Image (cartoon, coloured by chain):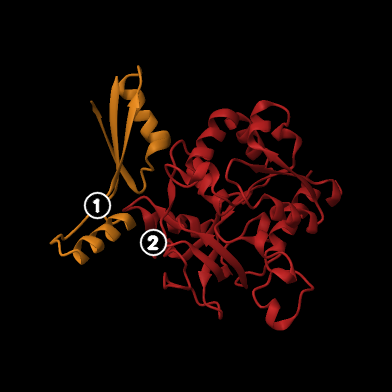
Chain colours: A orange, B red
Amino acid sequence: MRFEVRVSFKPGVLDAEGNAALDALKSLGFKASGVATAKVYYIETAEPQARVEEMCRKLLANPIIQDYRISKV
Amino acid sequence: MKKSDVRVCIVRAPGTNCDAETLDGVIAAGGTGEIVHFNRLHGGSRKLEDYDALIFPGGFSYGDEIRSGVIWARKFLGLLGDDLKKFVDAEKPVLGVCNGMQVIVESGLLPGLRGASEAPEACMASNASARYECRWIFLKKTGDCLFTEKYAQGEVVEMPVGHAEGKFTLEPGREQKILDELEANKQIVFRYCRADGALARGEYPLSPNASLDDVAGVSNPSGTVFALMPHPDRSCFGWQRRDWTRTGKVDGEGDGLRIFKGLVDYCAKKF
């Protein structure tokens, strides 16, 4: 089974890469009002989704500043 | 025991780079120690229980991948969690500096209001400047723990910082409640401040990261586990002070050495 885990910042948390990308896009003449980045992990595993949740809680996402979303792909 | 019998484990992992100066600080404080690779501890050739104190030094453990400190924190808990729990329960001191603080916070040992937590209760987020901040800053002692008994309450000291992720962050919506509890327990040991001791109030560059409530270092409620972002290991000796090239004063000690003295004295008295 292959899972996609998407980890993103909670609203209000500094997204330095997103801000830098927004600034660069504007300087290239694009009209953009916001850029947010996320990190995506593709996990090959025979474990059930509940265990992938555990992977997120224990390692991949810090619940204080990050949200995560899991989907089967 | 005698101070010279106090044996400190300075644990290192791939990417650790402040282990040598940390050991120098321990030795200058009168203790002894050993730099031990993490693999030797979980491989069994060294035992955590044989040491009186444990220090997670600065660096970039495991390349700061995923989040700074989290890989080492989770591997440590997974492979040596029981040993670490026994170590902390025995009130043996645990210190984290810079990356060591990120490790300890990600492990759930700090702030530790209800003991070690399974999931982290805080996060060392990216500096508000979105940059690596590497320079000297002022710190004010505003709490208390075994490592800082040799500083006066309210004393202002200088130490260097070198980090990109040092913004102490708590659960959104519950920040003030948790901060109040930390304050009541005297767990906010050091805060960023001005030279005259007025708190930085998040103002850059006094605060290098816009940390919540100017937090630079926190301890657990009993004061046996302590972590800070600034580097006491880089401010132990006169020749490490920022003004030594101007003043020519290379003798004496820097402000960071007393943290190691506090650790060594505590162990000598307790064990």
User: In which chain is the residue bearing label 1?
Assistant: A
- Relative depth, front residue between B138 and A40: A40
Q: Which residue is mark 2?
A: B130
Determine if residue B242 is in view: yes
User: In which chain is the residue bearing label 2?
Assistant: B
- SS at mark 1 in the image: loop
Q: From this viewpoint, which residue is outermost toward the front?
A: A28
Q: From this viewpoint, which residue is outermost toward the top?
A: A46
Determine if residue A14 is in view: no
- Relative depth, front residue between B59 and B157: B59
- SS at mark 2 in the image: loop
Inter-mark Cα distance, 2 to 1: 15 Å
| Residue B12 relative to residue A65: left or right | right
Residue at the spot x=70%, y=39% of the render? B36
From this view, report whether residue B239 is shown above or below residue A4.
Answer: below
From this view, report whether residue B216 is shown above or below residue B196.
Answer: above
Residue at the spot x=55%, y=50% of the render? B99
Picture quarter with the C terminus of chain B = top right
| Percent of width and height locating residue B257 | 72, 62
How many residues crowd around disc 1 within 10 Å: few (fewer than 14), some, or many (20 or more)?
Answer: some
| Percent of width and height locating residue B108 | 49, 42
Residue at the spot x=50%, y=47% of the render? B105
Q: Are marks 2 and 1 on the same chain?
A: no
Amino acid type of the residue tagged 1 in the rendering: Ala
Amino acid type of the residue tagged 2 in the rendering: Ala
Q: Which residue is mark 1?
A: A36
| Residue A27 relative to residue B163: left or right | left
